[in-house]
Image: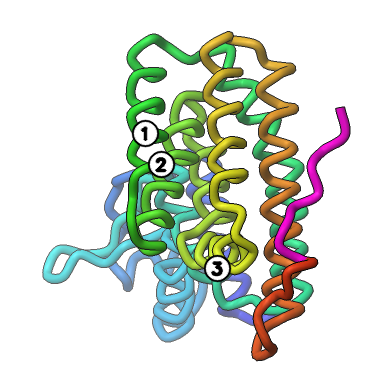
Amino acid sequence: MTVANRTIQNIRDLIASGRLGPGQRLPAEAELAGQLNVSRNSLREAVRALCEARVLEVRRGDGTYVSSLQPETLLGGLGFMLDLMQDNTVLEIFEVRRLFEPQATGLAALRVTQQDLVEITENLQRMQHVETVEELISVDYEFHRRIMQVTGNATLCTLMDALGTRAMRARVWRGIEQGGVRSFTLEQHGRIVEALAARDPVLAIAASTVHVSESERWLRRVMRHDGKPPLDEGDRRPALPEA
């Protein structure tokens, strides 16, 4: 292990043990380097790495502080990195989403309030009347994000934001628009809302599973047909789930 990596671990240990807490200012550079028995250059390298990881933040003219350590801070850059992934790795991300999102939707069905339902239903109505794909992507993103917020689990919300970024949804909706199945996809959203309104977690999990699985199917088609002629007529009708 390099000196810089060992220093990173030592600072993380200070935070994990509570000796440095969220929002707390780090000791002066010379003092901290002495405590950790490392050079100031090694300490600076470690601090830079922890700033990149959003564990620390430098406040110009004021020093270096431990970040809030909230999920949205520590995991906030995950979506950006996932958007850079390509080909089969993108499909792996969708497989992870398929494991998480239906269960989260089931949890939302147990915790949803009447006001939540009003807002989610309004979002669905906007989705049904948008005119451009760009608007559709944005409203779709907010629809799923709002459902995740209902769970009240900040870590889950941040992970789902990363797994379902706008860039990822853009690729899916491109396939849906090519396939001419927008109405079918919007119907899936409606079934999710119905399950939430019924406060039925089993139904919510089922509706979300169908939706995410179908989205994954269209993503596979987009990737298969990138740079090729549009889908022919035989490919335009989605395979409906069996009763």
Q: Residue at x 60, y 27 (%)?
A: 191
- Split into 4 quadrants, where in the image is the N terminus? bottom right
**Label 1–label 2 contact, CB within 8 A:** yes
Give above or below for 176 relative to 183. below
User: In the image shown, does 174 or 17 lie closer to the viewer?
Assistant: 174
Magenta stretch, overall SS:
loop
Marks 1 and 2, Cα distance to the nearest angstrom? 5 Å
In the rendered structure, which amino acid carries the disc numbered 3? Arg
Instruction: Examine the structure image and report whether residue 239 is included in the region drawn in magenta.
Output: yes
User: In the image shown, does 37 or 94 lie closer to the viewer?
Assistant: 94
Determine which of the numbered discs, if any, sits on residue 128 in the image. Answer: 2
**Within 10 Å of the Cα at label 2, are there few (<14), some (14-19), or many (20+) other Cα atoms?**
some
Q: Which residue is mark 1?
A: 125
The percent position of residue 201, horizontal first and vertical second, equals 67, 16
**Label 3–label 2 contact, CB within 8 A:** no
Number of numbered discs visible in the structure rendering: 3
User: SS of the residue at dot 3?
Assistant: helix
Task: Determine whether, in the image, residue 61 is placed left or right of residue 236.
Answer: left
In which quadrant of the rendered view does residue 216 lie?
bottom right
In the rendered structure, which amino acid carries the disc numbered 2? Gln
Determine which of the numbered discs, if any, sits on residue 174 in the image. Answer: 3
- The residue furthest right is 242
The percent position of residue 162, horizontal first and vertical second, equals 53, 55
Residue bounds of the magenta highlight? 235-243
- Split into 4 quadrants, where in the image is the C terminus? top right
User: SS of the residue at dot 1?
Assistant: helix
In the rendered structure, which amino acid carries the disc numbered 1? Gln
Q: Residue at x 58, y 9 (%)?
A: 198
